[in-house]
Image (cartoon, rainbow, N blue to C red):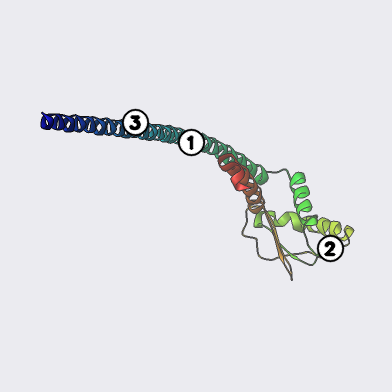
Amino acid sequence: MAGNKIIAKIEEEARQDAAAIKASAQKKAEAEAARTVAKAKASAEEILQKSRADAEEAAGRLTLVAELQNRKASLASRREVVQEAFDKAAEALAHLPKEQWEKLILHMITTSDVTGHEVLYVPAKDRGIYEKGFLDTINKALKAQGKAGKLTLAREAAPIDGGVILQGEDCDYDGSFATLLEDVRSEEEYRVAEILFGAEVK
């Protein structure tokens, strides 16, 4: 009898220990499961946020591409307008009335950095105008500015369609109409570039 009681007690204690171990294991398993779920939720949220950020970045890139395409279209249109304007300007310079032409040439020479001793190269088609008194008019204007007023006409014709070229001892002056238009075009091209690149060209 006494032995049976001892055995029963041992079995009861074993069942209690087993139940305690099972309960502890269950709690650990539940805690681990909770940590796993929380980690999974955090990872899912991180992935979702990254996906949103990637989507926003992609949308931003598409917007920039669209803006660039619009600017390129605007640039092409502006260049066409600029080209047309310069073609008309070149045509107008080539057909200036004599009085306006003389005023332009006189202005170009008298506002340039000349001493008045330079050699004047002009297109062959304009030579007769200078020989018939226009050169004297230019020299008188230079003398009125306090300069030498001793420009001479070169025998050789200038290889230009319009304007003048002055050759001096220290420096030369390219006053050809083509160069003048190109200088203005360079400034205009800068403004055209601003349309495409904005502040980047500044």
Q: Observer-nearest residue: 145 or 64?
A: 64
Residue 180 in the image: above or below residue 3:
below
Looking at the image, is mark 3 or mark 2 earlier in the sequence? 3
Helix or strand or loop: what does disc 3 sit on? helix
Residue under numbered circle 1: 69
Q: CA distance from mark 2 to mark 1?
A: 56 Å
Within 10 Å of the Cα at label 3, are there few (<14), some (14-19), or many (20+) other Cα atoms?
A: few
User: Left or right: 136 with respect to 20?
Assistant: right
Q: Position of residue 106 (x, y in %)?
A: 78, 53
User: Left or right: 35 with respect to 106?
Assistant: left
Q: Are marks 3 and 2 in contact (CB under 8 Å)?
A: no
Query: At 74% across and 68% down in the image, what residue appears?
Result: 168
Residue type indicated by callout 3: Ala
Query: At 43% across and 33% down in the image, what residue appears?
Result: 49
Helix or strand or loop: what does disc 1 sit on? helix
Residue type indicated by callout 1: Gln
Residue type indicated by callout 2: Gly
Residue under numbered circle 2: 149
Question: Could you say which disc has been placed on residue 92 in the image?
Answer: none
**Which is more foreground, mark 3 or mark 2?**
3
Q: Observer-nearest residue: 90 or 126?
A: 90
Question: Could you say which disc has been placed on residue 34 in the image?
Answer: 3
| Residue 136 appears in the figure | yes
